[in-house]
Image (spheres, rainbow, N blue to C red):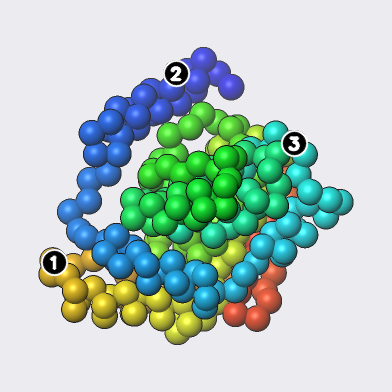
């Protein structure tokens, strides 16, 4: 990497940390459903969504578990379901869960503390501007992130940036707009009864990609290898950085 690129990256990190010291790097004129009714989304994640823990492990580590010291980050971790699952299964790795919602992160921290996990930490950051240097993580996972995030190419660019050479990411996304939108609809309905506000930044319907659109998001970046596939109501991507 050139000295100019390094300096640019360091300046980006400095600005992100500086803004985080006041408002955590966010300028949010609109309210968030994930802040107002965090328990409802946590319930959906725990009881209604598919549990892909075994699929994640089998896909990322086909010849056994991760090596000790593996640095893993989960984008859009929500209440910390997968971060805690993997942290508990592999106590010798380090897990960082990041999300935009402080109330979701509160649930994640409580979940990890309740299981006695000391290898999991959770931070409130914008997944489109991760406050960490290039090539920081060995593994990245994200589930249902794109359903509320229209800037998918920016998100994948950040995924690529923060992974080490040889690092891999596992992405899971719903295929059905109807089923993927149920949590958003339920949260919006409950929030309308219990809160008053000027609107919510989350879309009214989940953002769902066709198989072709999903594959194209990853193909637009210089991965060494990309594999996408579908299984029931979900589609998946496994990408390796060269």
Q: CA distance from mark 2 to mark 1?
A: 41 Å
Nearest to the eye among marks 3 and 2: give it. 3
Q: Residues within 10 Å of mark 2 (few under 14, many from 20)?
A: few
Q: Which sits in the foreground, 225 or 15? A: 15
At which x and y percent is residue 43? 45, 72
* Disc 2 target residue: 7
| Residue at 52%, 78% in the rendered image | 48
Element type at mark 2: helix
- Give the image quarter of residue 51: bottom right
The answer to whether residue 236 is above or below residue 137 is below
Which residue is most to the bottom? 178
Q: CA distance from mark 3 to mark 1?
A: 47 Å
At which x and y percent is residue 15? 32, 28
Q: Which sits in the foreground, 226 or 54? A: 54
| Residue at 69%, 69% in the rendered image | 229
At which x and y percent is residue 181? 41, 78
Label 3–label 1 contact, CB within 8 A? no
Residue 57 visible at all: yes
Label 2–label 1 contact, CB within 8 A? no
The answer to whether residue 93 is above or below residue 235 is above
Q: Which mark is residue 68?
A: 3
Q: Which mark is residue 197?
A: 1
At which x and y percent is residue 57? 73, 57
């Amino acid at each position: 990497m050139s000295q100019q690129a390094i300096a640019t990256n360091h300046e980006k990190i400095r600005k992100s940390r500086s803004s985080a010291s006041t408002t955590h790097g966010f300028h949010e004129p609109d309210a968030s459903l994930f802040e107002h009714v965090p328990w409802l989304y946590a319930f959906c994640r725990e009881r209604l969504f598919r549990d892909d823990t075994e699929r994640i492990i089998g896909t990322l580590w086909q010849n056994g578990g991760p090596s000790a010291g593996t640095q893993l980050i989960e984008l859009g971790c929500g209440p910390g379901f997968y971060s805690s699952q993997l942290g508990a299964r592999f106590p010798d790795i380090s897990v960082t869960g990041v999300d935009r919602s402080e109330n979701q992160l509160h649930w994640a921290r409580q979940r990890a503390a309740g299981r006695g996990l000391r290898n999991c930490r959770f931070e409130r950051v914008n997944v489109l501007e991760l406050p960490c240097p290039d090539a920081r993580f060995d593994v990245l996972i994200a589930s249902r992130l794109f359903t509320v995030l229209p800037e998918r190419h920016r998100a994948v660019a950040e995924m690529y940036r923060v992974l080490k050479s040889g690092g891999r990411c596992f992405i899971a996304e719903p295929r059905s707009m109807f089923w993927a939108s149920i949590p958003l609809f339920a949260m919006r309905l409950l929030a309308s009864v219990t809160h008053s506000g000027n609107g919510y930044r989350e879309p009214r319907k989940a953002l769902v990609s066709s198989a072709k659109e999903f594959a194209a998001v990853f193909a637009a970046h210089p991965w060494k290898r990309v594999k996408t596939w579908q299984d029931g109501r979900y589609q998946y991507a496994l990408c390796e950085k060269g």
